[in-house]
Amino acid sequence: MTSELDIFVGNTTLIDEDVYRLWLDGYSVNDAVALRVRSGILEQTGATAGVLQSDTMDHYRTFHMLERLLHAPPKLLHQLIFQIPPSRQALLIERYYTFDEAFVREVLGKKLSKGTKKDLDDISTKTGITLKSCRRQFDNFKRVFKVVEEMRGSLVDNIQQHFLLSDRLARDYAAIVFFANNRFETGKKKLQYLSFGDFAFCAELMIQNWTLGAVDSQMDDMDVDLDKEFLQDLKELKVLVADKDLLDLHKSLVCTVLRGKLSVFSEMETNFKNLSRGLVNVAAKLTHNKDVRDLFVDLVEKFVEPCRSDHWPLSDVRLFLTQYSVSVHSLDGFRHQVLWDRYMGTLRGCLLRLYHD
Amino acid sequence: MPGKLKVKIVAGRHLPVMDRASDLTDAFVEVKFGNTTFKTDVYLKSLNPQWNSEWFKFEVDDEDLQDEPLQITVLDHDTYSANDAIGKVYIDIDPLLYSEAATVISGWFPIYDTIHGIRGEINVVVKVDLFNDLNRFRQSSCGVKFFCTTSIPKCYRAVVIHGFVEELVVNEDPEYQWIDRIRTPRASNEARQRLISLMSGTGSGSAGKEGGPLKALLRQQTQSALEQRGGSPHRFCRRREFPFLTLTAFPPGLLVHVGGVVSARSVKLLDRIHNPAFVGIMGNTRSYKLLDWNSFNSDEPETRDAWWAEIRQEIKSHAKALGCHAVVGYSESTSICEEVCILSASGTAAVLNPRFLQEGTVEGSLEQRIEENLPVGCGFCHIPYDELNMPFPAHLTYCYNCRKQKVPDVLFTTIDLPTDAVVVGKGCLIQARLCRLKKKAQAEANATAISNLLPFMEYEVHTQLMNKLKLKGMNALFGLRIQITVGENMLMGLASATGVYLAALPTPGGIQIAGKTPNDGSYEQHISHMQKKINDTIAKNKELYEINPPEVSEEIIGSPIPEPRQRSRLLRSQSESSDEVTELDLSHGKKDAFVLEIDDADAMEDVHSLLTDVPPPSGFYSCNTEIMPGINNWTSEIQMFTSVRVVRLSSLNLTNQALNKNFNGLCENLLKSLYFKLRSMTPCCLCHVNFTVSLPEDELIQVTVTAVAITFDKNQALQTTKAHAEKSLQRASADNEEMLQFPLELCSDSLPSHAFPAAKEHLESASSNSGTPAAQRATSVDYSSFADRCSSWIELIKLKAQTIRRGSIKTTVTVEKASPMGDGNFRNRSAPPCASSTVGVVKMTPLSFIPGAKITKYLGIINMFFIRETTSLREEGGVSGFLHAFIAEVFAMVRAHVAALGGNAVVSYIMKQCVFMENPSKNQAQCLINVSGDAVVFVRESDLEVMSAQQPAVNCQPSCTGEVTT
């Protein structure tokens, strides 16, 4: 006696959170059944393996049918086929778009194209995440990217509106889209110590201050592309290190204030010119796309690593960066105060976040 | 009475992409009613077109309004080739014809295509202006209201019961017409859908519709109606002896006594068309008639009518033998395989209070009986027949409740448990399952084989039911439904009922096992081991279902002590003629303590199967009646579901035993799966569990289950049941004293209250249950809508569908159109969807009520037919994926229609047909589904309080308060 057909359809669509997770994690029905058996559900409920198999199949079928709708979450809200309570709808969407930290670190900043998709196999092997789950996460990134890429208005708002995600998740997606669009390099070995949260934090700061949206809220792509004009202008900052008098003056201003307040004062004093040169040169190079991509590599190389090798405590880094930015206001010969603040304000936040082991 | 139908097409959304090049669609809409068609403009390049059309007006006769559905077709405009159909929406405008129901149909309807399923939605507004709206006593059937429910709807009160209304329409299935060989599957499916829905309309409308040349489906509609007559207490007394009522729940006072289950079956040969007509009766056993209608043109409705008339006559005579003048909880069904057809009818013989019946029997004896004392809670158990002249040897004792009247020791009925019945503990679902192999045969030989098998099937089913009932320690069955399905090489019987312990009936005896070979020591041991197991099970069940009957001390009441029960022997291997066996249907009640004699493997098997039925896990109860006896504190969470399983039997040479085991396992597993799936709802009860078995092909068994899970409050449950039990005890003793006064009160009470409100508003409405054209599968493997349509003319009538309209009532409309509650609710309801822009929730339930809520308005009957076909079965996820999606779509369309009527729930929902055919080798499958229910507006009781606080005048609909429920 073999079962040809076995279905259960409720007026309210039944959603089993545990099975949903297994499905999202890309397990096959048989694997999912095995995992459920291991969870001890048979003992708890007195069910048989056959019952569990049938139940799992049913849920998988439902999820499979829902998947098409989950690709455009507002459709899930307006469709008539599945009657699902709003709280459950939200859960379905949120979980579907949730991604694994390990996975996102692999693709962050990469071009979301088919070429990369071929690498999913490798990512799957490397991270231990099933290929199916990698596909879903990658497709989610790509889908969100495609939809909001050319839209005007706030990036986070757009994502929230079109994908009905929670605020937290929408912000994460904004970071992913921003990174993918600007193709920031995040995969280099020296960047491995950074978490997705670190990058997302920087992305948010950059979106707020460095994009077109920061100056004009009515532009297309305003939150996705960096403000080209601003990047061009950053060349003007070069004078801070090119002009020897200005550099010396800057150093003495900073040193006067920080003397006695830093545990690593002497290291700071000797390294000041190097650090300053590093930070200003990063700014000046941002006119080239290639250098924009290497922003994080440069920041880590030019600032984080030197400080770390001298064992600066985080509090000292904070003090230094604050004083370093503020002192520029006292440089009479320097005319680009506004530009400096727009650059340094964001950079300071980023550096502080990036500065850890 | 003519009327004007007005339709406006507002917009569409989520349309499919019809133009690959632009990824868009140029959609327009055709609106068709009768022979008139209107078109909207083409809305270019959009998946969300805004037509915002003018009002399309159809001037039509009311008969058409009732019979025809409004047909809306969405198409993609194509300049160079034919326009492509996107899909259709059929809207039944019946609900707009009653002034107190819906006034407008407006909302988003899923656009349905028989090949692709749901493809987007369309927003439509429909209105009807009836010309002489002022006349409420319409002579046409326009004001007759149909209901699906088998009890009297909560907002209405039955005033007079009219009787059984039936209508039979026969039509040819378009799928078997010659044109089907050349037209597309889609056109064919649509023709079928349309015809079935048209027939359904015809049946419910006027009886005298003539069948056009295209007719091929058989449909039968039966309904009983209660009619309200103005204020006058005088009633017309047309004499009709046996009213058939399809009601399963009754207003208080209507049901006087219950005799027992009566049933009749008959095997018929369906005919081939165009043969010279003559009638030949081949064989005739007493209850199982084999009639050869072979050459008679059985597609004439008259012929089918005659068949049913015969069966009803049979039922009547059974009921009469039980001293009853009425049959309640009546239903009819058919099972068709090839050209053999089993017609079945069953009901419960009962004595009704003639005051409710327009054509009451005024026989002296009956009158007398009714004037007798009717103690509440046990009266219906008292035997209606004469003790000295019993129709069968039953074992009678004095009622354990009132001690005045005789009761049988076991009671089987097809009705719901009367609300006033005194029950001990909780009830449970009891099923008897049986398979019998049958040789493949043709025509007459096949019919003979079937009629020979039937009596044995019935006998076995009853034995199983009885054994299981005793194993549960209970003494009565309610909602009994026996389904016998015929297949190519087997017969299947499935009986479902809800077992309860009625306080009025004696405690059931146990089951004793006796061996045949007494000298074998190890055998003896085995027997005693089994006996112990059975006794343990009984004890366990008593605990599980809380069956601890109050010890009615016989000394106090001083009634005669019931004589010790005889242990009647039931010999298994006895071969009985079918004549004798048929009597067993009725006489099973007499068996008290059972002795199961284990003399062969068969009996052994039976005992084993008794013990393999696993009780539901803790927190779960199940029943097939409306409500679970012993639970009365429902909370508001409900989950209606349909589950379908098809299994393929593995080997060709199956034995009866293996078959039984398989079938048993299938049903048990299905139940287990349900319990597992719904585990998050515990404590809950599966109510109205409805199993349907069909045998779509050799070796394929299809089981369809529809039920509703309702949560309840466990703590409260315990309290209330206790209180209830105590109350019943008190009542029992009190009844003794009040006996003389009580019936008088009852009568005087019921009359004026019923007569009074009638004077003002008499919207006569008859309700009925909806029909089911059942496209019963005709031939076993005939994928006729697939490419190979080579069916010959002879196969024209292969598809026989049948509808049973279940009974109903004419009622007084108690909630008037102006009801502030209804309107208030309407406002309340419609506001949130707009605000949140999400889809409003529509509840569905097979029950006639919604727990924790009050139904304020009946909007009309929903009766829908869908056909779905696929030629890419694998791509749609195989048979399971295909049917899962289809059923989900059907639910969605029902909900959308209810929402468009302004309702928020469907009650008395039933899936009458689910005919599924597959041909995996061709990657094809086809399914036909028929569902129906009553669209209603309900208000949560908690909301109701808030509302009534706001508008104090609200909840005093004068007649509404005096409802049936009291």
Image (tube, helix red, strand yellow):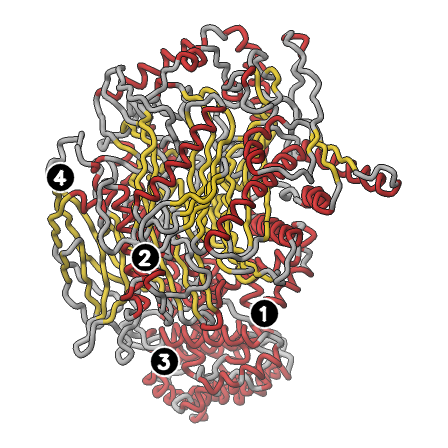
Residue in front for this viewpoint, B830 or B302: B302
Residue in front for this viewpoint, B723 or B59: B59
Residue type at tag 2: Asp
Residue type at tag 1: Ser
Residue in the image at 15% along x and 56% along y:
B35
Residue B479 x %, y %: 50, 35
Q: Which residue is the site of mark 2? A: B173
Disc 3 sits on a residue from what chain? A
Evaluate if marks 1 and 2 touch, with contact meaning CB atoms under 8 Å apart.
Answer: no
Q: Are marks 1 and 2 on the same chain?
A: no
State whether residue B817 appears in this view. Answer: yes
The Cα–Cα distance between marks 1 and 4, rounded to whole angstroms, is 62 Å
Evaluate if marks 3 and 4 touch, with contact meaning CB atoms under 8 Å apart.
Answer: no
Q: Which residue is the site of mark 4? A: B1
Residue B129 x %, y %: 14, 42
| Location of residue B505 by image quarter | top right
Evaluate if marks 1 and 4 touch, with contact meaning CB atoms under 8 Å apart.
Answer: no
Residue type at tag 3: Asp
Evaluate if marks 3 and 2 touch, with contact meaning CB atoms under 8 Å apart.
Answer: no
Total number of numbered discs in the rendering: 4
Residue in the image at 59% along x and 85% along y:
A190
Residue type at tag 4: Met
Please tell me whether residue A234 is drawn above or below residue B268 in the rendered image: below
Residue in front for this viewpoint, B86 or B789: B789
Residue A144 x %, y %: 41, 73
The Cα–Cα distance between marks 2 and 4, rounded to whole angstroms, is 31 Å
Question: Image quadrant for the N terminus of chain B?
Answer: top left
Residue in front for this viewpoint, B607 or B489: B489
Asked which secondary structure carries label 1, the reply is loop
Asked which secondary structure carries label 3, the reply is loop
The Cα–Cα distance between marks 3 and 4, rounded to whole angstroms, is 69 Å
